[in-house]
Amino acid sequence: TIQQTLLLLLAATVAARSAAQGSMNGPPVTPRDLSAYQNIVNINGQDGFYLKKDLYLTDTYTIIDGERVMGTPFLYITWLSGTLTTPDGRVYTDYTFRYNVRDQTISFLNGTDSLEVNEEIKEFTLNVKSGDSVVRTRFLSSAQVGSKGKPVYYEVMLDDANGQLLKSNEKVVASLSSGLLTTSSRKYLKLESTCYYYDKVKKKLTKIRPSTDIAALLQLSEQQAKELNISTYDLTSEEEVLRLIKAGLEKKKLKAF
């Protein structure tokens, strides 16, 4: 009947709207905020331009220099439990924290008030939910690896007796073209990361580039470098860099026996 047909059409419309809303609501509860761009590129279909426009007008934005920029300055959107340690050994464990990677500042919740940590930080950790488990992520102040000036915080990817693989995280303002109007663009906060190796013996921090001589960096012998087959690793990939540095440090340990 006509009535049944209308009911079916209404149900299909509601389902379609729910699916569209689901794609715009972003990742689950404790996501790393990879910037609003990740949400945009997941939206397909004929009405893509309007969905982008609507997303741009939602509350997931930051005001920078008087302009509305999609995304947030935080590495993780939500407040997370963790610890914060000062250089004199004090450890705070009873707060939830949020890491602003654009400004390189740490905030904590005191009741319902958000306050910025206003003293020197040695390191801090964030407990990040991943499926049914919780991953404890550690961040180290740049002052701990010999850097001067305003501190930034390195994510510790690997910590070994000989050295550490560290990663910097920052948010930069980037532009996304609408695709329909070439003169129209939307600004968003883009997450950029860079890997570094800190030699604990030499007390030296080195930025890892595609051209970096990993064998020299880890002080590997020619035979060890050959066994690792270093040239097959892609040094633009964080996962590949982690695998290579881990394997190289294991080689150094074997050399000692």
Image (tube, rainbow, N blue to C red):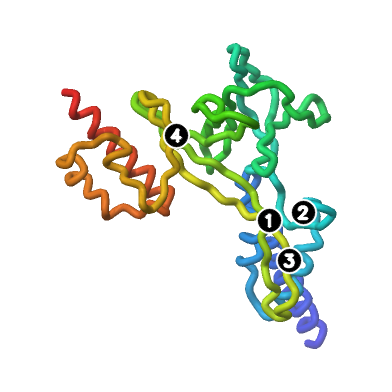
What residue is pinned by disc 1?
173
Give the mark nearer the N terminus: 4 vs 1: 1
Give the mark nearer the N terminus: 4 vs 3: 3
Find residue 182 and report its image quarter.
bottom right
Q: Amino acid at mark 2?
A: Tyr
Which of the numbered marks, if any, corresponds to residue 61? 2
User: Residue at the spot x=64%, y=49% of the render?
Assistant: 171
What residue is pinned by disc 3?
186
Q: Secondary structure at mark 1?
A: strand
User: Residue at the spot x=55%, y=31% of the render?
Assistant: 139
Q: Is residue 238 above or below residue 253?
A: below
Label 4 – label 2 distance at C-alpha: 34 Å
Give the mark nearer the N terminus: 2 vs 1: 2
Q: Is residue 218 above or below residue 43?
A: above
Q: Is residue 160 above or below residue 78?
A: above
Q: Residues within 10 Å of mark 4 (few under 14, many from 20)?
A: some
Q: Amino acid at mark 1?
A: Val
Q: Amino acid at mark 4?
A: Leu
Q: Is residue 111 above or below residue 182?
A: above
